[in-house]
């Protein structure tokens, strides 16, 4: 599904009303961090003959969600910048 610029702005407006903390936790920590931890561990388990889940899994479950904080914050900052640039020129149409 392709969204127009106006639809994207409206969606971001709805997302930003829910708050930055919620966005970072859902998109960064859970959406990026835990998914990357799982995929990385699965890949290491499939490829490495010396894979030790007792060491690797706890490290991944700490480091990837922490990096997800930065990813979520960076996504928020980028989307806010675009939103503010585009909404300064005029009102957004509502659906």
Image: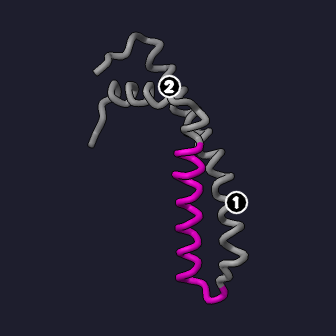
Rendering coords of residue 16 (x, y %): 50, 28
The secondary structure type at the circle numbered 1 is: helix
The secondary structure type at the circle numbered 2 is: helix
Question: Residue at horizontal 30%, vertical 30%?
Answer: 4
Question: Residue at horizontal 66%, vertical 78%?
Answer: 53
45 left or right of 86 in image: right
| Image: 69 above or below 4 | below
> Image quadrant of residue 76?
top right
Q: Which residues are magenta?
A: 25-50
Dominant SS type (magenta):
helix
Question: Residue at horizontal 28%, vertical 39%?
Answer: 2
Which residue, as the protein is rendered here, is positioned at the far bottom? 49
Rendering coords of residue 62 (x, y %): 70, 60
Q: Which mark, residue 62?
A: 1
Question: Residue at horizontal 60%, vertical 84%?
Answer: 48
Sooner in the amino-acid sequence: mark 1 or mark 2: 2
59 left or right of 41 in image: right
Q: Which mark, residue 47?
A: none
Residue that mark 2 sits on: 17
Q: Nearer the viewer, residue 16 or 2?
A: 16
Q: Nearer the viewer, residue 39 or 61?
A: 61
Q: Quadrant of the C terminus?
A: top left
Rendering coords of residue 37 (x, y %): 59, 64
């Amino acid at each position: 599904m392709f969204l127009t610029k106006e639809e994207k702005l409206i969606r971001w407006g709805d997302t930003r009303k829910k708050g930055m903390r919620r966005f970072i936790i859902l998109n960064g920590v859970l959406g990026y961090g835990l998914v990357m931890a799982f995929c990385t561990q699965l890949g290491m388990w499939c490829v490495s003959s010396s894979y030790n889940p007792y060491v690797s899994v706890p490290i991944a479950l700490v480091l990837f969600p922490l990096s997800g904080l930065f990813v979520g914050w960076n996504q928020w900052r980028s989307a806010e910048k675009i939103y503010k640039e585009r909404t300064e020129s005029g009102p957004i149409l509502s659906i």
